[in-house]
Amino acid sequence: MQAASASQGLSGGNIIKQLKDSGIEFVVSVPDITTAAGLLAPLEKMTSPRLIRVCKEDEGVGICAGLAHTGKRALLLIQQTGMLDSINAIRGVAVEYSLPICMMVGLLEKEPDVRPRQSTRYGVRIVEPILDAMGIVYHEIEGEEDVPKIKPAIDEAYVKSSPVVLLIGRRPHP
Amino acid sequence: MMNHRECFKALARHITDADIVLPVYSSAFEWLDLGARALNYTAHGAMGLASSHGLGLALGRPDKRVIVLDGDGSLLMNIGTLVTAASTAPKNFYHFVCENGTYEANGGHPIPNRGKVSFAGLAHGAGYASVHEFSNLKNFEQQIGAVLAEPGPVFGVLKIEPQRPQQRDYNRIHGAEVRQAFKDAIKES
């Protein structure tokens, strides 16, 4: 796990550039309030990566797995509530099958510049311990200085064929 | 109602080596018993997700037909997949549900609202333009070739007789060797 640092904000455009530089061709998403304006809104105006809207997050785990088998890179853009709802799919598909399921997870109700584990919100505090228990690599994306972690994290997931979670700790601006 | 094995035998006559087939639980064992194929994708990781894996495969490999042989209990666990597939609309995606009214792999218990839920109705409501329902083997044999020649997404209900629950070797559908074999096969195809 890599530490987050105090910062002044996050640029959605810079995050999207990292995704494109990583070769992400599909973004599979259920809207998340943390990333809705700064990431999902600009992504839906683009033709590449292609946006796939799903009804439930665990569907997205399956779709990303199918895409991975075809050599296409995908990102699952969701909220931590949806990640928690999809634990069994992540367990079976991403972890036990060792597939490169790359998840960008907005942390609903996390306070800016507060580490997820130190959040006053139960639904935020439990996220990293759960990922630790599952043996899933994660990175905190709190400020601009964290954005360059994104491409190497995605590349590593595909090289190792293992899941990764990028935790978005504040609302990116478009 | 159709016999599961006979229904799949009829289907298999229209499947080529280039097609990707994703059979689920009881259907997986029935399908595998018909003979080995390199592009069988049987490891879905969690109940209900076969159609989602199939959708990803269809999006990533538009040159191949992707055929999902779902279970009714499995589909109910991921019913939103119908909306997602209708919305995404890959022309190479064929989703069949084998409706036997039971969780056959989990003790043969009935699905909720057995006999009253309409899977064809759900697919229509989700936005599928092409929906078929078969309960007679002769009709199925006559029409399945044409159904698989339609542009997708296509949804089909296969009404099949329930079977007695059986002990199965699940390594045949999601063991590490099976998963690696599919990875190798799709890379080469």
Image: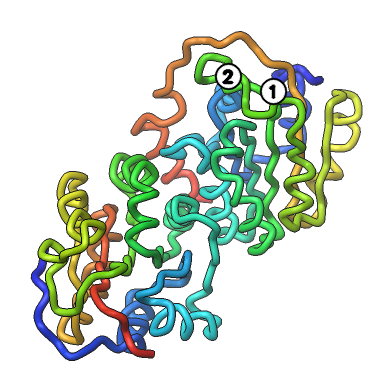
Q: Residues within 10 Å of mark 1 (few under 14, many from 20)?
A: many
Residue displayed at 81% across by 56% down: B129
The amino acid on which the numbered mark 1 sits, given as a three-letter code, is: Asn
Q: CA distance from mark 2 to mark 1?
A: 8 Å
**Side (left or right) of B119 relative to A137:** right
- Direction front: furthest residue: A120
**Numbered circle sitting on residue B100:** 1
For label 2, the residue is B104
**Side (left or right) of B20 relative to A120:** right
Residue displayed at 55% across by 58% down: A55
Compare residues A53 and B54 and report the one nearer the observer: A53
In the image, residue A47 lies at what x, y percent?
55, 81
Regarding residue B27, the answer to whether it shows in the image is yes
Compare residues B90 and A107 and report the one nearer the observer: A107
In the image, residue A78 lies at what x, y percent?
39, 64
> Compared with residue B126, is residue A34 higher up or lower down, i.e. above or below?
below
> Compared with residue A50, is residue B91 higher up or lower down, i.e. above or below?
above
**Numbered circle sitting on residue B125:** none
Instruction: Quadrant for residue A12, please give it.
Output: bottom left
The amino acid on which the numbered mark 2 sits, given as a three-letter code, is: Glu
Residue displayed at 31% across by 42% down: A91
Compare residues A12 and B54 and report the one nearer the observer: A12
Regarding residue B187, the answer to whether it shows in the image is no
In the image, residue A38 lies at what x, y percent?
39, 84
**Side (left or right) of A111 relative to B165:** left
Q: Are marks 2 and 1 on the same chain?
A: yes
In the image, residue B146 lies at what x, y percent?
86, 44
**Label 2 SS:** helix
